[in-house]
Amino acid sequence: MFKKIVVGIDGSDHSETALKLACDLAGKYGAELHLVHAPQPETVAFALGAMPGYAVLDTLPSPEDVEKAANQLMDRAGSVAGECGQTPAATFVRQGEPADVIVKYANEIGADLIVSGRRGLGAVGALLQGSTTQRIGKLAECAVLSVV
């Protein structure tokens, strides 16, 4: 049924739950697992403030800090996938609006399913422009699973 599953990763608890469910589906269907992250300076600032070794930030992070945080986030997601018995076929990090990045990547690889957490770290942006998950649902050319 599913051959390629794309998972949107943002570091939130809902994102991790979505990843675990996607790992379960990938195992059941023998599907490739693709992890996608679109770092946002605002959420990186939040994440860096919560990471050991970083002080609370009152300004937006540098591009280097954004890249470092994205790499740490994807390493963590890869570890979670490994704990679930899955090895991601690919990880993809690209700056941009998260829903657009996720859907474009899914289209490029011919994904059968996009899995994302229903709520992530972008709550402020969601108030202004709608949630990433809702936008994925509108743009996707494949099945979409929103995980609570």
Image (tube, rainbow, N blue to C red):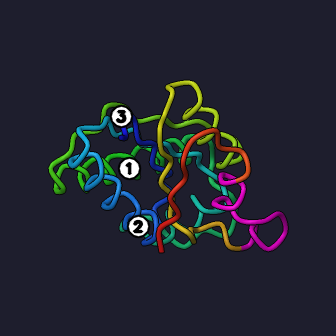
**Screen quadrant of the N terminus:** top left
Evaluate if marks 3 and 2 touch, with contact meaning CB atoms under 8 Å apart: no
Main SS of the magenta part reads helix
How far apart in space, not on screen, are marks 2 and 1 (Cα)?
10 Å
| Residue 15 horizontal/vertical position (percent) | 45, 63
At label 1, which amino acid type do we have? Gln
Residue 128 falls inside the magenta stretch: yes
Q: Residue at x 55, y 53 (%)?
A: 144
| Residue 42 horizontal/vertical position (percent) | 67, 61
- Please identify, in this view, whether the residue under mark 3 or under mark 2 is nearer the observer: 3
Evaluate if marks 3 and 1 touch, with contact meaning CB atoms under 8 Å apart: no
Span shown in magenta: 124-137
Residue under numbered circle 1: 72
* Dot 3 or dot 2, earlier in sequence: 3
Numbered mark located on residue 51 in the image: 2
Q: Nearer the viewer, residue 34 or 138?
A: 138
Residue 2, quarter of picture: top left
- Please identify, in this view, whether the residue under mark 3 or under mark 1 is nearer the observer: 3
- Work out whether 120 lies above or below 88: below
Report the residue that reaches farthest toward the front.
1
At label 2, which amino acid type do we have? Met
* Dot 2 or dot 1, earlier in sequence: 2
Residue under numbered circle 3: 3
Evaluate if marks 2 and 1 touch, with contact meaning CB atoms under 8 Å apart: yes
Q: Secondary structure at mark 1?
A: helix
Q: For mark 2, does the 10 Å Cα neighbourhood hold few (<14), some (14 to 19), or many (20 or more) residues?
A: few
* Dot 3 or dot 1, earlier in sequence: 3
Numbered mark located on residue 38 in the image: none
